Amino acid sequence: MKLKITMLGSGNVATHLSLALINAGHKIIQIYSRNIENAKVLAQKCDAIPIDDIPLLKNNSDLYIIAISDNAIADLVSKVDFNNKKVVHTAGSVSFNIFPKSITNSGVFYPFQTFSKKRELQFLDIPICIEANNADFEKFLINLANQLSDKVLKINSEQRKYLHLSGVFACNFVNHLYHIAGNLLSENNMDAELLIPLIRETSAKMKQLSPFEAQTGPAVRNDKESINKHLDLLSSSPEYQQIYKLISDDVYNTHNFIT
Amino acid sequence: MKLKITMLGSGNVATHLSLALINAGHKIIQIYSRNIENAKVLAQKCDAIPIDDIPLLKNNSDLYIIAISDNAIADLVSKVDFNNKKVVHTAGSVSFNIFPKSITNSGVFYPFQTFSKKRELQFLDIPICIEANNADFEKFLINLANQLSDKVLKINSEQRKYLHLSGVFACNFVNHLYHIAGNLLSENNMDAELLIPLIRETSAKMKQLSPFEAQTGPAVRNDKESINKHLDLLSSSPEYQQIYKLISDDVYNTHNFIT
């Protein structure tokens, strides 16, 4: 069934999700953003109406998707009458309880991925995590998610907090380590591109080996000589030195408490 | 020209490099390891002779490749007469100066990658970093490396130290962050496999965006509310809490000093 959907938000998640929904045969009727220019950019891609004013929201949408920054969701929810509508948010760190109980159908539709406007994404293998306030709406959301992705699962708000946190480690912090590694190269007249095969192989290993099995490097071997040499090389970057020390200690403790 | 090569070592690097050399048409004549069983395993794959005793090393090899653990290289070099031979080591953290000046042709042949015996690798895109004590031997090594990889470059010992260190950040530490992320999931009854699309996309971004441009998450947005919630969730893991705090601070400082 072709749904009429309202997208509240025009950022990375709103953009990727809107396009995936259109690909699955649905219609985005309105795009809301506090900034009309942002709404227009996405609305043009979706053949939708851009709006920046809540009273302009149409009442007849089959689903309202809130895909704005986590901190702004509570405020938006308080301003829109969702009582007899179907509404979800897409945020990892926001509890389902942000919706008042008066809403007939409320839920969460959380695609667990890092989104950048500049990169196209295949939705098919992105886990979509569903939560809903009733069984029928849960089925509705699971059915919709199954049209976008092969990996749909029920995740409650408590779990979703930890899922989001795990993503900070596996994505945001990993990306920062890439930044540090690239800096160490460019400061020594080498190209950060040199890292690409290593980075690709490190992430690809995860499919075949657990990170525990895949761990290599001086810390897991307790090679103190190499560790001390590295700490010396980092003496002009106390922050990098601290990060090196802390993670090396945790690698060592993780592998030597257990093995 | 088909070379006769002696491989000193039978670990991950020795294994992958031997197979790549054979694929390129060369012959591994002997595999040396202190542990004859390890030597036999690799020798069988290479149709080579396994040995565990230095006096058994043949003198007529075109190239001797030392691919043993970094800390054991100095000892091996002191025990073998390489004076009129061609010899390289494959270690990231070991200076070229570990070879005595009396050796006619000494060098480094460092493939910048993480190797696990359980995973097959395409050598073609692995950067091979070359250093040599004379121009002719440098040419010889570059020619050989070009037969294995599309990315061959000259890197001196000082640079190689930082290259190796960058690999610790981009691979060993990244892998440990995957471990932490997987732990947070399994402790909350979720499957670590959920991370795979996120991990793959985070590493794939690096080809298109610099890590600086690609950074997302609470720390770069200075979203203190989310950061404090996450620190609360980690209250039973002081080590994870410390790592979270330190990297978040460094992400924030990196992006807010510069932008």
Image (spheres, coloured by chain):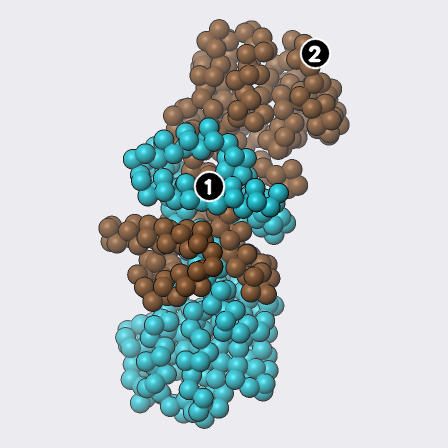
Chain colours: A cyan, B brown
**Point 42% across, 31% down: residue:** A228
**Residue A151, percent across and down?**
59, 67
Q: Secondary structure at mark 2?
A: helix
Circle count: 2
Q: Secondary structure at mark 1?
A: helix
Determine the residue positioned at 38% across, 25% down.
Answer: B158
Of residues B1 and A158, the one nearer the viewer is: A158
Q: Quadrant of residue A56?
A: bottom left
Q: Quadrant of the N terminus of chain B?
A: top right
Q: What residue does disc 1 label? A: A248
Vertical side of B108 occupied by A178: above or below: below
Q: Residues within 10 Å of mark 1 (few under 14, many from 20)?
A: many
Residue B56: mark in rendering: 2
Q: Is residue B58 left or right of residue B111?
A: right
Left or right of A230, for residue A53: left
Amino acid type, callout 1: Ser
- Above or below residue A144? Residue B210 is above
